[in-house]
Amino acid sequence: VKPDEHKKGYENITSAKDSVLSAIVIEGIGIEDARIIWDNQQTRDRLEIKDLNLNTETVSINRPIDVNLSFLWLNSNNNLTGNVKSETIISVNEKLDHYTSTVSKLDMIVAGENIPGNFLAASLKTDVDLDLSAQNLKIAGLHLTMGDIGMLADLTGTSIMVNPLIQGTIKIEEFSPRKLLKAWSVSLPAMKDDRALKTLEMRFDLFAKQESADFQKIAIKLDDSQIKGEM
């Protein structure tokens, strides 16, 4: 067989496989009130997931799929409980190597004695584009909130399968350290100015590799003071 003919045959097989995948249509997936228990007999770790609900619209290649997920979880070893609710739109191509996702809502609540304030609520929104063939990753419009702290980020990744490099800008929105520490039951030392630690905000550029991370253009504003630098 000539090399060109062999290559052409491979391309025909690949094209046929892609056509088959494109033709597959699942009229939605539904799971209601499911329960999953993971019990490690060696380490005695136990994780229970209950009230698991998963609902999707029609599932098809190259078509956006609405996915709604919710569940409760319990980690008896750490006495932690929580719940998760998410609304996501997912899309994947015929070759299964390019994924896009829009997380319009991901809310999580964690409660337990080991959590500062015994309670933590977090929320996430973002757009993700993962191209495995090009080894590129893009995270756009990420907005993460944990209690009173909010974080904004736009990140890109290259060579993610071999020598990953993640870079982008991260911003911590203004919040009150004084109020946060009080919610965590942390006592502040006596200060001359009762208004100290009233506001804090930060931004920096991140360059992260497998074994190192650089923080550039760091800008911190604490009350009326400003700090700039690099690490």
Image (spheres, rainbow, N blue to C red):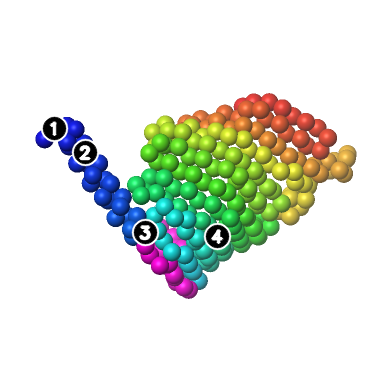
Return the x and y of residue 56 as percentages of the image width and height. Answer: 47, 64
Q: Name the residue under label 4.
A: 87
Q: Residue at x 56, y 38 (%)?
A: 155
Q: Name the residue under label 1.
A: 2
In front here: 181 or 147?
147
* In the image, residue 129 lies in the stretch drawn in magenta: no
Q: State the SS at label 3.
A: loop
The reply, left or right, for residue 223 in relation to residue 63 is: right
Quadrant (top left/top right/bottom left/bottom right) for the C terminus: top right
Which of the two discs, 2 and 1, labels the residue nearer the N terminus?
A: 1
- Distance in Å between CA atoms under marks 1 and 3: 57 Å
* In the image, residue 44 lies in the stretch drawn in magenta: yes
Which of the two discs, 1 and 4, labels the residue nearer the N terminus?
A: 1
Write down the region rendered in magenta: 25-49
- Distance in Å between CA atoms under marks 1 and 4: 51 Å
Q: State the SS at label 2.
A: helix
Q: Quick check: marks 2 and 3 in contact, CB under 8 Å?
A: no
Q: Name the residue under label 2.
A: 8
Which of the two discs, 1 and 3, labels the residue nearer the N terminus?
A: 1
Figure quadrant of residue 22: bottom left
Residue located farthest toward the bottom when viewing the structure as drawn: 33
Which of the two discs, 3 and 4, labels the residue nearer the N terminus?
A: 3
User: Which numbered tag is attached to residue 42?
Assistant: 3
Report the predominant secondary structure element of the magenta stretch: strand
The amino acid type of the residue labelled 2 equals: Lys
In front here: 104 or 71?
104
